[in-house]
Structures are given as C-alpha cells and as structure tokens.
C-alpha cells in the first residue's frame, strides 16, 4: 500500500536502529540516557551560539513530563532539501547524523562529542516532538511521533518577527526506565555550559511544581567565573590568572589559581565535553605550569643549582584550574572516550600557558614568591610522607603482609564476586558478620573517629589505624603505589546508619576515596548500602520502607494504628536476619553506586566540610547536624 521512497526507507531504518539499541546512542536507558536527550537538544543551540548567532537558550520542563529547548539563533533551515525532497528541518530531525551536513560554517561544531548523535535521536526516542522555527519572516511548525513525521511542515504565521528554534519533546516512556527529569542534574550541566561559553545565557525553568522554579546562568567571566566558583570557599594565594587565544585552529582558554589547600582540582574540556581522562590539553597545561614555576624559582635563586626540580605534582598542590579547548575534529580516546588525543593540542596549550605564566610571575613578584613557596612546601611534605610510608611499610601494614585483625574476610578469593562492607561501629559490624554471605561478603568494622583526611597531610593519614586497616583490606596500596588491579573486592560498600553521623562518616570515606583512590570511584567499585528507615508489620507480614514516601505508600489509606511501625535509627537496631534481608543480601538489597559524575559537587562538599575556612563548615554542620559526635573536623 505505502509507496515509500528510498529516502523514507532510510529514515525508517535509522529510527529503527535507534529504538532497537537506544543505549548505543544515548549511553543507557536509565537516568543518564534520559538526560542525554536534553543535552543533545541543548548542544545544538549552544553550537548556534558558538557560531555567533544565538545568545540565549531556554530549557523548560513541562508539567506533562516534556522538555523544551529554545534558542534565538538563525533557526533550522526550512527550505526544500533537493536530494531528500523534504524541508531541511525535516531532514535534520529524521535522518541520523544529518545535522552535521548543515553544520554551522566557520564555528566549532561542538555537538558530535561524547554522544553527539544529533537531534534526530532525541526525536526517535520521543513519544512526541514539535519543532517550531522562526526564519525568513515566517513561523513554521512540524510534528513527529517516535521519529515519524505526523504533521508536515506548516506555516503558523506569515509575518513573524525574529529568528530561532524551539524544540519540544516528550521522552518515550516505553524506551526509558525513568522519564523523570532531575533539576539538579540538569542545572549542573547547564551551569557548566554557561561557564564554558562566556556570555551565553542559559535558563532552566521547572514548571512541574505548583510554584515554578527558574534559574538563569550567564557568566561574563566565563571560565574565570568557573575557577572563582570552585575556589569560593578556599583561601586563594593570588588573583585568578587567565589566558585565551587561538592557534592552528584550536581555541584555548585557561584560568588558574592556587589556594591554601592540598589538592589538585583541574577540570579539562574539549568542545564543552568534560575530558575526565585528560589528554593532550591537560598534559600541555601541567607541563607548562611546572616549568614556569621551576624556571622562576631558579631565576630568583630559590632553587639552587644543586637542587632537584620541583615535581609536576608538587607544583599542582592547591591548584584549581579550568582548561577548555575547542577544535574541529577532536579525537576522543580512552575507556570512556573522554581523553583528548589530538597531539598538536599539547604544544599549543603548553606555549600559550607558558607565555602567560612567565609574564605573570615577572609582573607580580609577590604572588610568584607565594606560589613557589607553596610548591616547595608540597615537595617537603611529599618527602616526609614518603619516609612515613616507607617506615609504615616496613612495619608491615600497607603491603598486604597481613590482613588487619578486624577484617572478617570472605572465603571466595575472586575479586569479581567479592564484596567488602565498611561498617560503622563494632556492634553493627558484629550483626553484619552474622548476616553476611560468608562466601562473598567481607566485613570491616570502622570505629569512632575517622581521620579528617582532607586537612591532614599524607603522613598523618597513613598513621591512622582505621585508614590503614582499610587500605590493607582493599589491597590496592596508596598514592604512587596505588594499583586498582590489586583491589580484592569489586564492590566496596559503605554501610552507615541512616542518620547525621552516618552521613558524615560516609562523606569522610568518600573524601578519602576521592582524594587517595579516585580510580575506585571512577571504575564504579564504590557503593553505598541503603538500610531501611522503617520496619512495618501488620499481623505476620513484615515489610520495610526506605523512604518516607514508601512508608506512606505501605500504610495507604489504612489506619496507621493497625501497623507496628519501627523506626530504625541505626543499623544496630536490626537483627542479623533483618540486616541481611534489607541491606546486604544480593537478591533483596538496594545499593547505590557512587559515580564521579559531578566532581565539581564532590569537591564543593568536601571543601565545605573539611576545608580550612571555619565559617562555611560551621554553616554546613549547623544546617545538617543536630548532634555531631565521632567526628574529627
Ligand atoms: C544548520 C544551518 C543553520 C542553522 C542550524 C543548522 C541550526 C540548528 C539548530 C538546532 C537548534 N537550534 C538551531 N539553530 C540553528 C543556518 C543556516 C543559515 O541560516 O545559513
């Protein structure tokens, strides 16, 4: 019956491929994939801004579960596409990868990055999509369902003003495990995009609550504002140093600032994509910084001829930086395709950053001296830490000579199936020991004050008994000796009480992993156990509620008096069988995998909680804690 043309068959084949394997196109069909739909739509608008035509992007989450993205760019072309015999906008929306063919000339095509699959994929995975374009004095509209055109392009207004594109879509509920957009996830990425694209205004509006929420991100300072934001709660040693330029078709922007902290916080981006695995731009940047510091230190005689150079790591202590490059045809490599491989970028970034730093140091001797002094301190501390480490290694703790006495190990030695529960307190540890599956589940009780690893220098960290027991049990070693391949358990599960102390101890443990064993989080080995908040019994039937909402759901419209509701304040209030059933047993428990998705947020939280500034920490604790015990803040 249907007289499909060759082009239409191509379209259907493309859509079918996307709907058959959505994960291939948007990463997965869970939360992440769902949000990827928004990013795809936003990336197109950002591209239009980078090409110099759009200034404003507006993202609206509708009450009906929809999302719309609107920009004030040129509008997707609407003239007939000769080859495809349909309007260009229809080609862009229905043909896989067609977007690129119309790519904005001159600018850097940014979409085409990590997933960068194009807006047609969003269309294919949406129950409905409406696209409106203002252009050539007209307002036109076209509609789709699951990627198939249901309303051909039609003119809504003939004397329309302005230009721009509006894309409205309703994610396909049959394709995604969840279609609930998260404000926090979206605002983080949109804020990041606003930092990375100076002057671009991005608004996020949520119309789902009774009182709509709206936030606009616009940073005239670009990545300088980003560094300012990251160092918000730290004490910086000098004003932010920044540079930007374009060489050999690569646009580079860097901003950096040392603060009085001990960690390195460098965020690197290529075409607005967070290059978590680093790459050529990061290499060039770090080398330039280290060389500039060493050159200045030698010139001023702070480093004598016989002194060794400051290592690159020493020069990075307390440094916060953002390195952003934009280029055509980026090569993304590495396990998660977030490592920039274009070799020429290394020397380009190196050159630009070297010039800027040499100049800054010459012009600002006071700051230059403070920075060099900071790096020298790092070097001294590192040497002291190495001595402490060597000493403690000889004393047997860290190289796996013997497992810690407190560890209740599992019998299976295959890391792939083995799990370790880091349990708050000896008594919960005892219960966990009885409730575990002895074959695959190991228990390590952690007692009392866990060291504040953010503030402490490495030597103190390694002297802490709880930390040492943990390192030894995990088997990976630490710092320069860290080797994730030696991890003895592929699930490291933090199990703390569902109260304030529990959450603090969890934060401290996550701090430690973040600072000292980051690969553990990056590779997805770290989990958080989810103990229930309530046990609910009716007659002989025992159920558990993990949230207040679940409790309400269980009670429903019945009389709460008909149940024996027990609130669990701590793990210790459950017996071994209950703890096993609700929190530990593989078939019935819930676990939350810890992701390093938002290193920005993690860094923020750790800085607030553990940083040197007393005020923010006090505010944080007052906001979250009524009783803080067991904490060494
Ligand atoms: C191709 C060519 C032109 C604009 C666009 C694509 C475009 C795409 C999207 C997607 C969302 N917003 C967008 N804005 C523009 C411009 C062609 C021209 O006018 O010369």
Image (cartoon, helix red, strand yellow):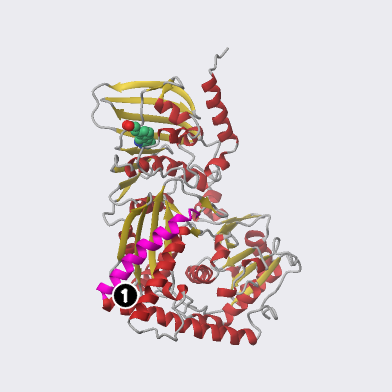
Q: Which residue is mark 1?
A: 237
Residue 430 is drawn in which quadrant?
bottom right
Which span is picked out in magenta? 340-364
- Check the picture and name the quadrant holding the N terminus: top right
Q: Is residue 411 above or below residue 28?
A: below
Figure check: 457 above or below 153: below
Q: On the image, which quarter does residue 233 sit in? A: bottom left
Crowd around label 1: few <14 · some 14–19 · many ≥20 (10 Å): some
Q: Can residue 456 be found in the magenta stretch?
A: no
Which residue sits at x=36%, y=66%?
A: 354
- The answer to whether residue 584 is left or right of residue 412 is left
Work out whether residue 442 or residue 391 is closer to the camera in this orientation and state it. 391
Is the residue marked 1 within 8 Å of ligand 1, measured from its CB? Answer: no
Q: Is residue 588 above or below residue 286?
A: above
Q: Quadrant of ligand 1?
A: top left
Against 512, residue 75 (above or below) is: above
State the image coordinates of residue 429 (x, y, percent, origin top left): 64, 73
């Amino acid at each position: 019956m249907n007289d499909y043309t060759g082009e239409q068959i191509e379209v259907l084949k493309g859509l079918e491929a996307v709907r058959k394997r959505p994960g291939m196109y948007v990463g997965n069909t869970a939360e992440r994939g769902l949000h990827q739909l928004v990013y795809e739509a936003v990336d197109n608008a950002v591209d239009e801004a980078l090409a110099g035509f759009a200034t404003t992007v507006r993202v609206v989450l509708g009450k009906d579960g929809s999302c719309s993205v609107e920009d004030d760019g040129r509008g997707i072309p609407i003239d007939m596409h000769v080859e495809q015999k349909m309007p260009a906008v229809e080609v862009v929306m229905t043909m896989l990868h067609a977007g690129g063919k119309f790519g904005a000339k001159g600018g850097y095509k940014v979409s085409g990055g990590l997933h960068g699959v194009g807006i047609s994929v969003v269309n294919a995975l949406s129950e409905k999509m409406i696209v409106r374009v203002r252009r050539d004095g007209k307002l036109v509209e076209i509609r789709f369902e699951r990627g198939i055109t249901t309303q051909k392009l039609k003119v809504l207004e003939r004397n329309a003003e302005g230009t721009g594109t509006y894309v409205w879509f309703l994610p396909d509920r049959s394709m995604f495990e969840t279609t609930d957009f998260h404000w926090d996830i979206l605002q983080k990425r949109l804020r990041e995009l606003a930092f990375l694209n100076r002057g671009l205004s991005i608004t996020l509006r949520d119309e789902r609550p009774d009182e709509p929420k709206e936030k606009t991100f616009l940073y005239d300072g670009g990545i300088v504002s980003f560094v300012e934001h990251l160092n918000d709660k730290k004490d910086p040693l000098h004003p932010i140093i920044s540079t930007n330029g374009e060489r050999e078709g690569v646009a580079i922007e860097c901003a950096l600032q040392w603060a009085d902290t001990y960690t390195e916080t460098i965020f690197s981006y290529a075409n607005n994509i967070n290059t978590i695995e680093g790459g050529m731009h990061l290499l060039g940047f770090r080398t330039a910084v280290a060389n500039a510091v060493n050159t200045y230190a030698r010139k001023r005689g702070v480093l004598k001829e016989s002194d060794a150079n400051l290592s690159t790591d020493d020069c990075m202590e307390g440094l916060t930086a953002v390195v952003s490059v934009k280029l055509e045809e980026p090569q993304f490599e590495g396990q998660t395709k977030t490592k920039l491989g274009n070799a020429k970028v290394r020397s380009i970034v190196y050159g630009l950053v070297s010039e800027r730093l040499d100049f800054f140091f010459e012009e600002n001797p006071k700051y230059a001296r403070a920075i060099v002094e900071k790096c020298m301190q790092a070097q001294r501390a590192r040497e002291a830490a190495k001595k402490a480490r060597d000493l403690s290694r000889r004393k047997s703790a860290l190289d796996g000579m013997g497992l810690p006495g407190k560890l209740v190990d599992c019998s299976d030695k295959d890391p792939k199936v083995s799990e370790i529960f880091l349990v708050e307190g000896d008594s919960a540890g005892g219960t966990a020991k009885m409730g575990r599956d002895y074959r695959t589940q190991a228990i390590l009780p952690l007692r009392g004050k866990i060291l504040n690893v953010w503030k402490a220098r490495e030597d103190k960290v390694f002297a802490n008994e709880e930390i040492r027991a943990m390192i030894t049990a995990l088997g990976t070693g630490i710092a320069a000796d860290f080797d994730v391949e030696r991890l003895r358990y592929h699930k490291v599960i933090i199990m703390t009480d569902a109260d304030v102390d529990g959450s603090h101890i969890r934060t401290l443990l996550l701090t430690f992993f973040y600072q000292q064993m980051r690969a553990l989080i990056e590779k997805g080995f770290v989990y958080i156990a989810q103990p229930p908040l309530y046990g609910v019994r009716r007659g002989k039937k025992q159920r558990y509620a993990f949230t207040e909402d679940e409790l309400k759901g269980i009670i429903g419209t019945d009389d709460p008096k008909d149940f024996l509701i027990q609130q669990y304040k701590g793990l210790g209030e459950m017996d071994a069988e209950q703890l096993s059933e609700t929190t530990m047993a593989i078939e019935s428990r819930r676990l939350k995998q810890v992701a390093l998705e938002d290193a920005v947020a993690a860094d923020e939280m750790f800085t607030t909680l553990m940083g040197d500034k007393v005020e923010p920490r006090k505010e944080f604790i007052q906001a979250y804690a009524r009783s803080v015990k067991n904490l060494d803040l």
